Each structure stands twice: as C-alpha cells, then as structure tokens.
C-alpha cells in the first residue's frame, strides 16, 4: 500500500470510530494536513449526522465549507465531542510531534477543548523516541533570534522555516537534533521561552486514541 492509501484507511477508520458518538448537535474538531484532508472528505459522507465542525486552520475550514459542512468559531462552540488530526510522529504513550503544516497552535487549542483526541497516522509516524522529525516551534516574529538562541541552550539546532507565516501571523523555527526522552518536560521548558507561542509537542495533552495504518490493517491503540 502507498502512504496515501494508508492515510485514507485511517481517515475512513476515524469516521467509523466517531460515528456512534455523534448526535445532531455535535461539533467535531478537525485537524490539518494531508491525513486530516482525507478525514474531511470521508466526514462529508455523514454530514447530516452532526451539526458542524471547528477547524484548526484556514485551509481545513475552507475544505470543510467546500463539502457543505458548517464551520464554527471555537468561541461559539460549547463543547467538541472529538478532535481528529494527524501527526508527524507518535510514540507508544501517544505523545506527538505536530506542526509540520504550521498549524500547531490552533491544533493544540482545539485538542485542549475536545473531550477526546483521536490521532490518525500511517505507520511511518510511529517512533520509540520523539525527535527525528524536527520539532516545530511557533514564534512571535520579533522574538525569532532570541528564541533560537534559547533553543540552542536546550540542546537543539533551530532552523527558520523560510517563507512560512502561520494563520496567526507568526513564524516557525524547526528544531533539529533533539532526542526528546521526557516530552512533558521539554514541552513545558520550550513554552517558558519568552516569544514562543507554542511548540509542536503534544505531551501534556497527548492523544487518547491512535488509529495507526499498517500494511496489515488499521490498529487501534488507546493511551495507557
Ligand atoms: C499540521 C500537522 C499535521 O497533522 C502533521 O504535519 C501531519 O501531516 P500529514 O497528515 O500531511 O502527514 O501537525 O500542522
């Protein structure tokens, strides 16, 4: 199977997983990226069964609207029954690196509100220790050099993502060469740097369920 076929398989599995939880007034949190895009496309097949969605990016909001799925501002949503999103890496504790698509801050906000966080990923995203994928950090533009120097003190090699402006008007530093053995501590330490909006570690709020696409089928892994 190709990587795209694995992404489609987990996206379809996510719709099957959430369908029994949905009610007419349910609002679904929707992530960002190619796997999330497949999820949006399958979600459209059951759009009569829930009220609408909150999106973690302008791109996902646009795709939802094109399918005729109502998109709500998070501030007007009382609750989110579930949040479904992809990841750049996941470890066995379902702690994630996200932000390859630069949507990490809104993703973290929507994940924080959702009752359940379902991560969908193809098997290439599974790692024992996070950090092979460069960790994205969203930064207020004027703080870029300061934050980069502080990240070097934490042991990383930050690289400015050229030409990337987030939906929030900020920039991204991708931190290379960090073996993240304590994701909760690293997430907190980076967030303490003045000028950091957030970082792409989802450890304080890890995924609750991972639907992992393998050649043998989709595995459902629940956080212990
Ligand atoms: C976007 C993300 C994505 O979930 C992550 O980059 C995975 O993307 P894809 O599904 O395209 O592999 O965090 O900010």
Image (cartoon, helix red, strand yellow):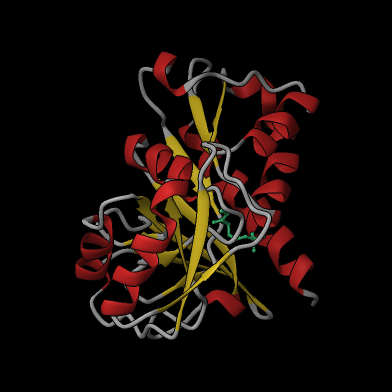
Residue at 26% across / 78% down in the picture?
153
Taking the image as shown, residue 111 lies to the left or right of residue 153, namely right
The percent coordinates of residue 189 (x first, y second) are: 21, 64
Residue at 54% across / 47% down in the picture?
103
The percent coordinates of residue 133 (x first, y second) are: 52, 77
Residue 178 figure quarter: bottom left
Residue at 54% across / 50% down in the picture?
85
Taking the image as shown, residue 114 lies to the left or right of residue 25, namely left
Q: Quadrant of the N terminus?
A: bottom right
Who is closer to the viewer here, 103 or 77? 103
Please tell me how many numbered marks the rendered image carries: 0
Q: Is residue 158 above or below residue 110?
A: below
Taking the image as shown, residue 190 lies to the left or right of residue 171, namely left
Determine the quadrant in which ligand 1 lies.
Answer: bottom right
Q: Is residue 41 above or below residue 35?
A: above
Q: Quadrant of the C terminus?
A: bottom left
Who is closer to the viewer here, 184 or 207? 184
The percent coordinates of residue 151 (x first, y second) are: 33, 71
Residue at 48% across / 50% down in the picture?
104
The percent coordinates of residue 93 (x first, y second) are: 31, 71
Taking the image as shown, residue 143 lies to the left or right of residue 29, namely left
């Amino acid at each position: 199977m190709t990587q795209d076929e694995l992404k489609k398989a987990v996206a379809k599995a996510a719709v099957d997983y959430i369908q029994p939880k949905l009610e007419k007034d349910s609002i679904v949190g929707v992530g960002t990226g190619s796997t999330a895009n497949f999820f949006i496309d399958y979600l459209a097949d059951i759009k009569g069964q829930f009220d609408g969605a909150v999106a973690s990016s302008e791109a996902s909001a646009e795709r939802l609207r094109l399918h005729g799925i109502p998109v709500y501002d998070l501030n007007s949503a009382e609750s989110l029954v579930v949040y479904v999103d992809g990841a750049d890496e996941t470890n066995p504790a379902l702690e994630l690196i996200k932000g390859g698509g630069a949507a990490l801050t809104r993703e973290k906000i929507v994940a924080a509100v959702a009752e359940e966080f379902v991560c969908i990923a193809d098997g290439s995203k599974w790692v024992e220790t996070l950090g092979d994928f460069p960790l994205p950090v969203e930064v207020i533009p004027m703080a870029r050099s300061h934050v980069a120097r502080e990240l070097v003190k934490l042991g990383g090699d930050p690289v400015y993502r050229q030409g990337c402006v987030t939906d929030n008007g900020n920039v991204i530093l991708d931190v290379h060469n960090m073996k993240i053995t304590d994701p909760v501590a690293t997430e907190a330490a980076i967030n303490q740097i003045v000028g950091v909006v957030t970082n792409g570690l989802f450890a304080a709020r890890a995924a609750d369920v991972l639907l992992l696409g393998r050649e043998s089928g989709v595995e459902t892994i629940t956080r212990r």
